[in-house]
Amino acid sequence: LNRRGGPIGVFDSGVGGLTVLKTLRSALPAERFIYLGDTARVPYGTKSAASVVKYSLQCADALIVRGIRCLVVACNTASAFALDALRLRYPEIPIIGVIEPGAAAAVSASRTGHIAVIGTEGTIAGGAYQAAIHRLNGRARVTAQACSLFVAMAEEGWIDGPVAEAVARRYLEPIFGAGWGGAGRGAAVTAVIVPPTVLEPPQPAVPDTLVLGCTHFPVLHAAIRAVLPAHVRIVDSAATVASAVAGELALPAQPPDGGGVIWLATDGAARFARVSGIFLGTALRADEIEIIDL
Amino acid sequence: LNRRGGPIGVFDSGVGGLTVLKTLRSALPAERFIYLGDTARVPYGTKSAASVVKYSLQCADALIVRGIRCLVVACNTASAFALDALRLRYPEIPIIGVIEPGAAAAVSASRTGHIAVIGTEGTIAGGAYQAAIHRLNGRARVTAQACSLFVAMAEEGWIDGPVAEAVARRYLEPIFGAGWGGAGRGAAVTAVIVPPTVLEPPQPAVPDTLVLGCTHFPVLHAAIRAVLPAHVRIVDSAATVASAVAGELALPAQPPDGGGVIWLATDGAARFARVSGIFLGTALRADEIEIIDL
C-alpha cells in the first residue's frame, strides 16, 4: 500500500477529538482527513487501560486499511494508554498523540514551573501528563484533577453560563483558590494577584498554567476562564498537535485536492451529527457519517 | 438446568442498577443475587437501539449460564429497547424491566394525569415510558426530558448541594416553573401552589408526578426534591420493581441460605468498587468483583 498522499487519520472515543480535527483542518487546509469517533464504546475516560489499548488498536486498524499516511490520536485517554502499543504495531507511519504536544506547550507557557492538568479519570489516574511534563522539566510541580462532569456538560452543549461556571468553580477552586473572577463574584480581584515575575520556581502554591487534558474541554474555555485567576494561562493541546503533525509530514498531500473529511463512527450517526455542531461550529448531517463495526 | 432455587440475575450498563439491587435485597432478603454491570460498554443511554439490544442479550446470556431463575433489567435504556428481544430468547424465565413498574406507579400516584418523566437520551427518545403510561391511562399527558448530566453527576458523587441543585433546576424549571424551593431561592413559595384537588384531569400545565426514569437518579433525590414544587410526587421505579419480582417468583429461594450477591462487571473493578458506595451506601472492595468478558 503506497501511503504517500494518503489522508491523515484522526480518532477519538467520540466527538471530543473534533476540536483537534478543527484545528488540524485550519492548519493544514489542503490535506484530506478521515475522522473516526468510537461512539459505540465512548467514553474511554472511565475504562481500564487494557480496554483502552484494545479499542485504540481496533480504531487504528480501521484507519490503516483506509490508507492513512499519519495517525493522530485525538483522545487524551487513548494517548495516555495506547501510544506505545500503536507505535509498536504500526512503525511505518508517524503516530502523534495529544499529551506530548500538550505537555511541551505547558512547559513553555509556565514561568513558575507549577502546572495544573485537568482531564478524564483515566488520563489523570494514568499519570501520563505528569510524566511527560517531568521529562521536559524535572523540577516542575504538577497538580492534576479529574473533571469527569466536563465531558457530559460539553456534549450537552452547556458550555457557558452559571451552571458551567458553578461546575468549573467546584473543580478548580481547590487548585486555584476562591475569590477570582466569574459570575456572581464580581470582577476579578486583581489587587491580590502576585505578578508572575515575582514568583521564583520551583513550586509556588498556585499553578500559573492550566492544561486542558481532554479534547472535550476546549469548548468550555469561557466557563473555565471565568473562574481562573487572570494571570493563569490555558493550554489547549490541539494547537500544538497541529504543528507536530505538520512537522511529521515530510511530504505534503499528493495531489492537494482541496482537503475534505471522511466521517466514520461506530454507533449513533444521528447523535454524532447533532453533537458535532458544539465541537466543529457547524453540525454535520447524519447521512454524512458512515457507521462501521469494530 | 434446574433453575429452581437459582439466584435472581440483575444487570445494568454500570453502577446505576445498584439502586434497584439495593431495594430488591431489602424486599427479598433470603434471595441470592448476581449483579452484572456492563462497565466496558457503559453508558447505554447515548447508544443506538441496535447496540443496546446486542449488549443486553450478551448480559442476559452471561447470567443465564450462571443458573438464574429470574432476570431483572435494572437499566431503563435496556428496558426500553431490549425487553422484547430478551423475552423472545428466554421465554422460560420471568424477565422484569423497570419501565412497566415505573409507569404503573406513576399512573397510581398522579391525580391530574399529567406525568413528567426524566431519563437518559436513549430512554426518552425511545418513548417507552410515554407508551407504557398511555397503555395504562389513555388520557394521560406525559412531559419527557432527557437529563444526561445527572448520570455523570451521580457517579461523581455530587448528589446534593448547590451544583446538583443548579443542574436539576436547569432541567426541571422549564417543566415545573421557576420560583419553587431550593437553595438560593429561600423557602418554597407555597402561596402559589394550587392544591392538587382543584386541578381536574386531564392535562394541567404543570405535572403533579415526576418519574425517575433512570436507575442513577434516585441518589439525586434530595437535589431534585429541592427544586420541585412541594406537591409533586417523585416516583422511583425501584420499589415497584421489587414487588413485581416478588409477584413473579412462585417459589421462594430453595433453600433460603441467607442471601448474598455475586458481583460481576465487564471492566474496571477498582472504579466499580469506588463508585458503588454512592449507590449502595457501603462501597464494595475491588476484590469482591469478578471481571468477565462479553
Image (tube, coloured by chain):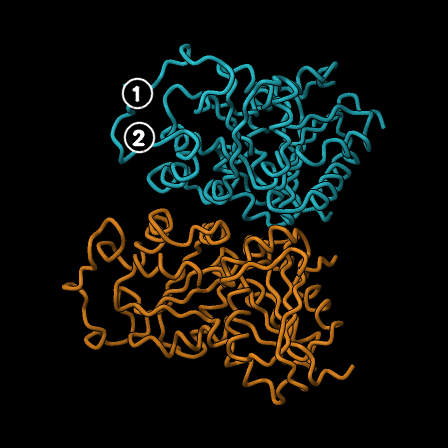
Chain colours: A orange, B cyan
Which residue is label 1 attached to?
Answer: B192
Q: Is residue B33 left or right of residue A114?
A: right
Instruction: Please say whether residue B75 is visible from this viewpoint.
Output: no
Q: Residues within 10 Å of mark 2 (few under 14, many from 20)?
A: some
Q: Nearer the viewer, residue A77 or B45?
A: B45
The residue positioned 41% from the left and 14% from the top of the image is B196
Q: Quarter holding the N terminus of chain B?
A: top right
The residue positioned 22% from the left and 51% from the top of the image is A185
Give the residue at the far left of this rendering.
A191
Say which label, 1 or 2, has the lower sequence index: 2
On the image, the x and y values in percent for residue B252 come to 71, 15
Which residue is label 2 attached to?
Answer: B179
SS label for mark 1:
helix
Chain for disc number 1? B
The residue positioned 24% from the left and 57% from the top of the image is A181
Q: Nearer the viewer, residue B63 or A104?
A: A104
Q: Quadrant of residue A1?
A: bottom right
SS label for mark 2:
loop
Give the residue at the far right of this rendering.
B1
Q: Amino acid at mark 1?
A: Val
On the image, the x and y values in percent for residue B195 come to 37, 13
Q: Residues within 10 Å of mark 1 (few under 14, many from 20)?
A: few
